[in-house]
Amino acid sequence: MTKNKYVCLCKALLLLAINNDSLACKDPDFNSLTQMSEQELSQFGCTKDQVTLQLVSRDSKYNEAIELANKLKRRGLLDGPSLRVQADAFYQLGRYSDALAAHLLSTSTPAQCTTFSGCRFEYSTAIDHYENSKYYQANGNIHEAAEELKKGDNEFYKTCRSYNKAKSCTPIRDRILQSINHQFNRQK
């Protein structure tokens, strides 16, 4: 087996180990979205700026992402997924208090652009707490970070034990945390 096939197989197995439904959850087709007119996008509750915001964040253009998010905010169009992008951009630029504020706001702001609605699966609540912990930790809120980590573990183990044997939960948790750590520690 070649190295590329092995890596693909490992990634597929990881997704299956975390959740069988994870494979059905895909990113939007940005090629199609960028070709749509403003009117066509509005059928999904989206604007060109929301699509562009998602694209520039994937290209690690963090300052541009923050500018677009601020433009959306002035127009009253800054929804949950856009706030998540803004929070990530602030985080990657080391603006941790702004990142924490945007992230916390994103958790209570619904998605307007339905094509960017996040996928939910049985560990999503735990992952939400783990991500909260990372933002609190980066901002120096150690007590809140520890509380969120504890809440994440409680949610994770409660859910995992209802689906799996107890001994398989810790490796699954470790893979989830490793994935989250990678997301937060990627190079700028």
Image (cartoon, rainbow, N blue to C red):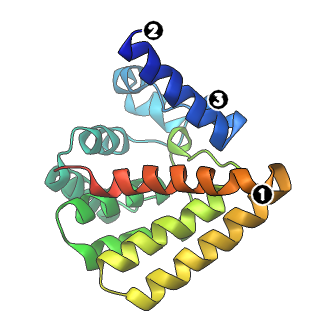
Determine the residue positioned at 36% across, 75% down: 100
| Residue closer to the observer: 42 or 59 | 59
Image disc number at residue 135: none
Q: Residues within 10 Å of mark 3 (few under 14, many from 20)?
A: few
Q: Are marks 1 and 3 in contact (CB under 8 Å)?
A: no
Determine the residue positioned at 30% across, 64% down: 74
In the orientation shown, which residue stands out farthest toward the top?
A: 1
- Mark 1 belongs to which amino acid? Ala
Quarter holding residue 136:
bottom left
Residue for badge 3? 24
- Residue 135 lies, in percent from the top left, at 38, 72
**Disc 3 on helix, strand or loop?**
helix
- Mark 2 belongs to which amino acid? Met
Above or below, 66 relative to 8: below
Question: Where's the N terminus, which quadrant?
Answer: top left
Marked residue nearer the N-terminal end (2 or 3): 2
Above or below, 134 relative to 187: below
- Mark 3 belongs to which amino acid? Ala
Image disc number at residue 166: 1
Q: Is residue 169 left or right of residue 113?
A: right
Determine the residue positioned at 80% across, 49% down: 164
CA separation in Å, label 1 and label 3: 26 Å
**Disc 1 on helix, strand or loop?**
helix
- Residue 89 lies, in percent from the top left, at 25, 58
Residue for badge 2? 1
| Residue closer to the observer: 12 or 25 | 12
Marked residue nearer the N-terminal end (1 or 3): 3
- Residue 174 lies, in percent from the top left, at 53, 55
| Residue closer to the observer: 121 or 174 | 174
Q: Residues within 10 Å of mark 1 (few under 14, many from 20)?
A: few
